[in-house]
Structures are given as C-alpha cells and as structure tokens.
Image (spheres, helix red, strand yellow):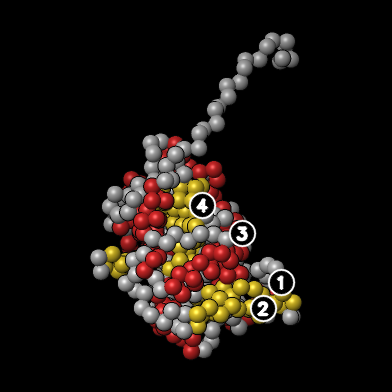
C-alpha cells in the first residue's frame, strides 16, 4: 500500500533465463607454454565461436597447420578456422592492427596504448636499478593498464568510440600523470591521438557490447563456444607465484569477469598440462633441473618463449602444482602435451610432495620465500626409451608411457582425454 492508501501496481518479474549454451574453457595448469593453442586449434575445428577473456598481447600461442606456423599473441588460436567468430575480451590497439586481417567481434574492454608499453619498460628498469631484480615482464604494457583500471583512470574501447573530445582530454590527463611519475618518459600525445582518431572508423564495425553479445550467444540458437585462456594458473594475479605473475586472472573466474557471463554457463574446463614443467623468467621453480636433464628438455622441447624469445627453464613434472591448479579451476579433464619429449629417458621423475624444513606440507605455499626453500619429493617411474611421435591413439603408446599418463590421472584425480576422437566427441556434447 502507498502512503495515500491506494494499492500499488504489481511489479513485473523478469523470468530467470534458462542456462542456454555452455562454454568450453581451455586453461593452462602450470606457468604457461603448455600447448593451449594446439588444444584450442583442435577443438575449434568443431566450434562456432572462440573467445579470449583476459590478458593482452603478452600471450604467445604457436599453432602449426598444413606446415604453416602461426604465432598468436592477441587473437584466439582457433581463428584459423574460417567458420568461427572470434570474440576478444582483451585489447591492444596497435597490436590488433598488426595482425588482424579478418573481422573479429571485440568487447569494449580496457585499451592498451603505446605509452603503457613504454611505462612497463621504465618500471622494469627501475626495479632492476633499485632492487637488483626485475619481474621479467614481456613489456607489453599489461601491468600498467591493469593498474590504471584498478585506479579508475583507465580508458576503454567504448570511451574511444564515444565522444572523441572527451576521450582526448582523459587520454592527455593519463599521459601527463605517467610523465609526472616517470620524468624520462617521452610521449607524443598529439601524434598518438591523431593515430587513435584514424583507428576509430576502422574499429567501429568490429565492436559490440560485450555483455549483450555474449548473452545473445549463450541464449540464442545452439552454439559451440570455446574460451581460450592466456598465461596459466601459476601466473594468476591472485593465486599465482606472486609477485612473479601476470596482471590478470588466468584461472576459471577470469572467464566470467573477462567476458561478462555467469558461472552457470561454464561447462567443461580443460586443464592443459605439459608432460614436464617449464617457466619463463624468474621466480621460484621447485622441480627445475639446472643440469643436463634441464638442458635436454629445453633442447628437445624447443623451449623458447613465443613472445619474448627467452629460453624457458625446464624441470620434471610437478603434480603438487597441478593439483593446486585443479583446486582453483575444477578441471573436468586434462590435456597432456609434449609427452614425446620424454621418449629418450630411461627413468622419469615426478614431483608428488613438498617438504619445508624437513616437514611435509599439505599445500602449495603462497609465500615466494617459502616456495624457494621447498624440497620436492619425487617418485621415479620407468621411461619407455622409444619414439612415440607416430602414435595417434593412447593404445599405440608404449606400456610405460601409458602408465605415466595414468599415474598423472590418479594423483591429480582428473581424467585425461586420450584421443583426438574422444576430445571431439566431448566437444560435440557441450550443447544442451
């Protein structure tokens, strides 16, 4: 009843939408470079839409198709399939125009400008001078743009496409803010604004409101939607080996916040696991092998960063961190990659536990200094010492290679998908 005594009109209830289509998520379970691009490329053969949800062009995914090598930094790896729609929830304007030759649907997300990349380089230099150690970033501006986002001074694609005069004022204010913080920083503000103004008309046809577009995709006709995560669980800003991490959430929660979609529409979550462990840059690495084993893994695996060109550090598979990644992401299946790199080993070690100060710990340490002191508890498995590169099914693998895969499944508690057919059949089951 209102104050006047008259009866209020009944409120119209908006019905809760049905769950609709579910997305398939592919995430890295280690420190990145697990082979996510290859898995996404395989799944995208039967997909209608592929999405990137976090990070920027700091990612590096390599895919080889018909003897042609593609290195992706910003675009989803599945874009090789001409039938899919690519939806990007991350954005670096200059990088996009360097690589894009097709129409992509872009979310109005935070934009990475050239001066963000310059700031990234200056910050790394300052860290080296002041602390004797930098973070080892890719210097693609990802940290500065996420910092600006949190400080509420960032600029989004929707700002660029709205009132350019207002956008210009905010751009100038942000650039001058950085210049006051870093006096050596040189920014051609007027020149950059002219370039951005030219980009506006090129970008406009490709931009959609991200939330509305995803909602229509999820609740429209049946669609097979694939989400490609960049980086990996141990590089997550909240749950990774901080501070040697990226600036975004590369775990499953980043799918919802990056694309503006509810968790009820997350379907299968694949954790991509390399058959051994690698890491680019600095930071704790418990199972690292600073010896001929590490060198052999690096050489055989051609372990060089796609984005930075840096050699990757290599070590035995560490199931403690894989289980930790599973705790966060809730993997429904594992995709094991580069098993053939282990073909030459007669014995293979697998990390199954951690000790600190001679005491077993039941968890993955959050503190970096503690992680540096970890003593890995290994189990030694027999190798297969034979070539598996021609194997095209699980049954074709040597017995000891099959045992290695089953050992991983049992310790993590997640099944692996053992054949191309099984993966494709699972992809076909994602529709309601």
Which x, y percent locates residue 59? 44, 65
Q: Is residue 202 visible?
A: no
Which residue lies under the disc numbered 2? 374
Which x, y percent locates residue 14? 55, 27
Which residue lies under the disc numbered 1? 361
Task: Using the image, tell me which numbered label, if any, was put on residue 255.
Answer: 4
Tell me the element at label 4.
Answer: helix
Q: Residue at x 28, y 52 (%)?
A: 82
- Mark 4 and mark 2 lie on one chain; the one further toward the N terminus is 4
Which residue lies under the disc numbered 3? 327
Left or right: 58 with respect to 48?
right
Quadrant containing the C terminus is: top left
Q: Nearer the viewer, residue 398 or 43?
A: 398
Q: Distance between the residues labelled 1 and 2?
A: 9 Å
- Mark 3 and mark 2 lie on one chain; the one further toward the N terminus is 3
Left or right: 232 with respect to 301?
right
Mark 1 vs mark 2, foreground winner is 1
Look at the numbered discs 1 and 2 and tell me whether their residues touch, using CB distance below 8 Å: yes
């Amino acid at each position: 009843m209102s104050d006047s005594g008259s009866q209020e009109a009944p409120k119209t209830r908006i019905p809760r939408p049905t769950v609709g289509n579910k997305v398939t998520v592919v995430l890295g379970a280690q420190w990145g470079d697990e082979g996510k691009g290859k898995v996404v490329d395989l799944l995208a053969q039967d997909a209608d839409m592929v999405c990137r949800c976090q990070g920027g062009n700091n990612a590096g995914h390599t895919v080889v198709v018909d003897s042609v090598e593609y290195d992706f930094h910003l675009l989803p790896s599945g874009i090789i399939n001409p039938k899919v729609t690519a939806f990007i929830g991350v954005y670096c304007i200059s990088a996009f125009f360097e690589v894009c030759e097709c129409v992509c649907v872009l979310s109005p997300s935070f934009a990475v400008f050239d001066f963000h990349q310059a700031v990234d380089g200056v910050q790394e230099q300052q860290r080296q001078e002041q602390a004797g150690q930098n973070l080892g970033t890719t210097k693609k501006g990802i940290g500065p743009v996420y910092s600006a986002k949190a400080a509420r001074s960032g600029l989004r694609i929707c700002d660029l496409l709205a009132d350019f005069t207002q956008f210009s004022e905010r751009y100038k204010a942000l650039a001058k803010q950085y210049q006051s913080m870093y006096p050596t920083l040189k920014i051609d503000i007027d020149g950059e604004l002219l370039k951005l103004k030219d980009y506006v008309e090129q970008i406009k046809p490709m931009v959609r409101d991200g939330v509305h577009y995803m909602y229509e995709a999820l609740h429209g006709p049946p669609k097979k939607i694939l989400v490609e995560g960049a980086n990996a669980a141990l590089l997550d800003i909240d749950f990774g080996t901080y501070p040697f991490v990226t600036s975004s959430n590369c775990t499953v929660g980043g799918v919802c916040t990056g694309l503006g979609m509810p968790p009820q529409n997350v379907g299968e979550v694949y954790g991509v696991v390399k058959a051994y462990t690698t890491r680019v840059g600095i930071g704790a690495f418990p199972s690292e092998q600073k010896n001929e084993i590490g060198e052999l893994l690096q050489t055989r695996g051609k372990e060089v960063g796609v984005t930075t060109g840096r050699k990757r550090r290599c070590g035995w598979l560490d199931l403690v961190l894989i289980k930790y990644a599973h705790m966060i992401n809730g993997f429904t299946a594992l995709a094991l990659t580069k098993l053939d790199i282990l073909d030459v080993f007669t014995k293979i070690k697998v990390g199954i536990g951690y000790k600190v100060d001679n005491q077993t710990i039941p968890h993955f340490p959050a503190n970096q200094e503690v992680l540096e002191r970890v003593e890995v508890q290994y189990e030694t498995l027999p190798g297969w010492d034979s070539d598996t590169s021609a194997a095209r099914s699980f049954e074709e693998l040597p017995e000891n290679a099959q045992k290695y895969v089953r050992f991983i499944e049992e310790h993590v508690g997640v099944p692996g998908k053992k054949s191309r057919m099984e993966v494709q059949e699972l992809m076909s089951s994602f529709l309601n």
